[in-house]
Amino acid sequence: MPRIMLVDDEPNVLRSLERLLTSPQLEIECFDDPEQALRRVHTATFDLVLSDFRMPRLDGVELLKQIRVMQPDAMRLILSAHTDLQAILSAINEAEIYRFIAKPWDPYDLKRTIDQALAHRAMLVENRRLAQQVRNQQEQISRQEMALRELERSHPEIARVVWGEDGSVLLDQDSTE
């Protein structure tokens, strides 16, 4: 079950987000203090973090930058009533934000964005798992090839095939000599 962290210093906004997103398929944790949220990231893994942009003591960009370092697989979204283009670009570039969501948000769009972010995360995690599986298989094949080469080097006759005139494989090597 995906675990989502919601961070906003305004309790009413936080409650509204929680009501909108509450579902049996999601585990949601809410924090009105970004420093407390950061402490929680040390003890629990989150699939998605949705943070307000402007908060006292620790802004959303800095919070998400720190979360990116600790939990790089967590999708990061930022929510803001401010549309300062330079700040938005900074957030996207520095904290590798998946999406910027404007306040007030459209409930349908917000839910759809979160669903897309979770699906994107699942795809990234699965791609990484498959790539590791391929690396492991290649490693195993390489070890097997090395063992085969060593066997052929130490016993050259093992890989020699004696063909009959009719194209058959002759098992008795003495019959050709």
Image (cartoon, rainbow, N blue to C red):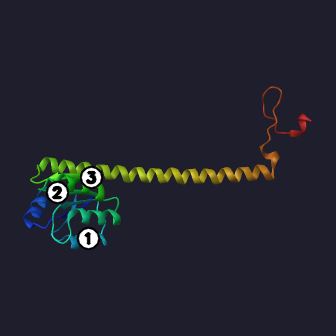
Label 1 to label 3: alpha-carbon separation: 19 Å
Residue drawn at 29 percent across, 63 percent down = 65
Given the image, on which type of amino acid does mark 2 rest? Answer: Leu
**Which quarter of the figure is the N terminus placed in?**
bottom left
In the structure shown, which secondary structural element does the residue marked by tag 3 occupy? loop
Q: Which mark is residue 98?
A: 3
State left or right for residue 93 relative to residue 9: right
The residue that mark 2 highlights is: 79
Q: Earlier in the sequence, mark 2 or mark 3?
A: 2
Instruction: Give the mark, 1 or 3, whose residue is nearer the N terminus.
Output: 1
How far across and down, in percent of the image, does residue 101 sit?
17, 52
Q: Is residue 89 visible?
A: yes
Q: Give how far across and how far down residue 75 sits, in percent.
A: 28, 56
Whether residue 173 is situated above or below residue 164 in the rendered picture:
below
Camera-side residue of 25 and 130: 130
First along the sequence among labels 1 and 2: 1
Q: Which mark is residue 38?
A: 1
Query: x, y (%) of residue 47?
Result: 29, 59
Image quadrant occupied by the C terminus: top right
In screen coordinates, is 158 left or right of 69?
A: right
Residue at x 9%, y 67% (from the top left corner): 11
Q: Image check: 169 left or right of 28?
A: right
Relative to 71, say whether 174 is above or below.
above
Kind of residue sitting beneath label 3: Tyr
Q: Label 2 to label 3, Cα distance in Å? A: 11 Å
Tell whether label 3 touches label 2 (CB within 8 Å): no
User: Crowding near pointer 3: few (<14 within 10 Å), some, many (20+)?
Assistant: some
Q: Label 1: state its secondary structure.
A: helix
Instruction: State the residue lying farthest toward the front.
Output: 86
